[in-house]
Amino acid sequence: MEFPPEELETARLVLRRPNIEDAEAAFQSYASDPKITRYLTWAAHTSPAQTREHFQQAIDAWDLRMGHRMWLIERRADGALLGTIGCTVHFHRAEIGFALGSQFWGEGYMPEAMKRVCEAAFEDDRIARVQALCDEENARSSRVMQKVGLRYEGRLRQYGHHPNRSDTPRDCAMYAIVRGD
Ligand SMILES: CC(C)(COP(=O)(O)OP(=O)(O)OC[C@H]1O[C@@H](n2cnc3c(N)ncnc32)[C@H](O)[C@@H]1OP(=O)(O)O)[C@@H](O)C(=O)NCCC(=O)NCCS
């Protein structure tokens, strides 16, 4: 399978590429939630138009099959839009980023989604390594990576740009899983 595919499924979730019509629901669910952006590079959206603009870039990336490919995470039971996970592929390396609306935290949804993305990555022979970075203070995110089986590889000093946390560059933790781990 060529990674990343446009859709993936898990027991409880569907991961799928976004449509422009999803922007309003995404704005309500997670994109306008300031609790999720503390350690992210972007600020919570203040209007659905901002989310639509962001979605158009994501749709373009899927159409061109390059750049950051973003999936929406939908709950199969009721179709609720929980959040987002995405990846950027660079030669043999895939890097993952993710966020979930805060009302959906603590149910193991992100580990479930990320595990499926890692499995799909290694179904493509080109991919040898899946990595993810987080602010060194972002304990919830670190825990997700550990639960999915990524290993802590070290601290990247002054690596992150997390303007909702601080104006100055942030130390980040690098986690990765490689083929054969
Ligand atoms: C990180 C995030 C995706 C987690 O998703 P989730 O589906 O809630 O993950 P889980 O249900 O596995 O819960 C997170 C884990 O962190 C633990 N945790 C929660 N608060 C914690 C804290 N303050 N310190 C340490 N661990 C904590 C939970 O106990 C749980 O681990 P456990 O199952 O071993 O008990 C979600 O919190 C989020 O969207 N955060 C904001 C966006 C973000 O920071 N993204 C990552 C950018 S790198």
Image (cartoon, rainbow, N blue to C red):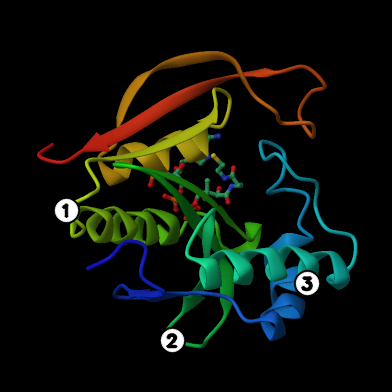
Of the numbered discs 2 and 1, the one sitting upstream in the chain is 2
Q: Furthest residue to the left?
A: 180
Looking at the image, residue 127 lies above or below residue 154: below
Cα distance between the residues tagged 2 and 1: 33 Å
How far from the left and from the top, in percent, is residue 67? Answer: 54, 53
**Image point (84%, 64%), residue name:** 50
Residue to which mark 1 is pinned: 125
Looking at the image, residue 139 lies above or below residue 75: above
Q: Tag 2's secondary structure?
A: loop
How far from the left and from the top, in percent, is residue 108? Answer: 40, 57
- Tell me if mark 1 has few (under 14), some (14-19) or many (20+) residues whose alpha carbon lies within 10 angstroms of its own: few
Residue to which mark 2 is pinned: 77
Side of 138 relative to 57 (left or right): left
The amino acid at mark 2 is Ala
Side of 35 relative to 110 (left or right): right
Which is in the foreground here, disc 3 or disc 2? 3
Of the numbered discs 3 and 2, the one sitting upstream in the chain is 3
Cα distance between the residues tagged 3 and 2: 26 Å
Image quadrant holding the N terminus, namely bottom left
Along the viewing direction, whichever of 110 and 59 lies nearer the viewer = 59
How far from the left and from the top, in percent, is residue 162? Answer: 71, 31
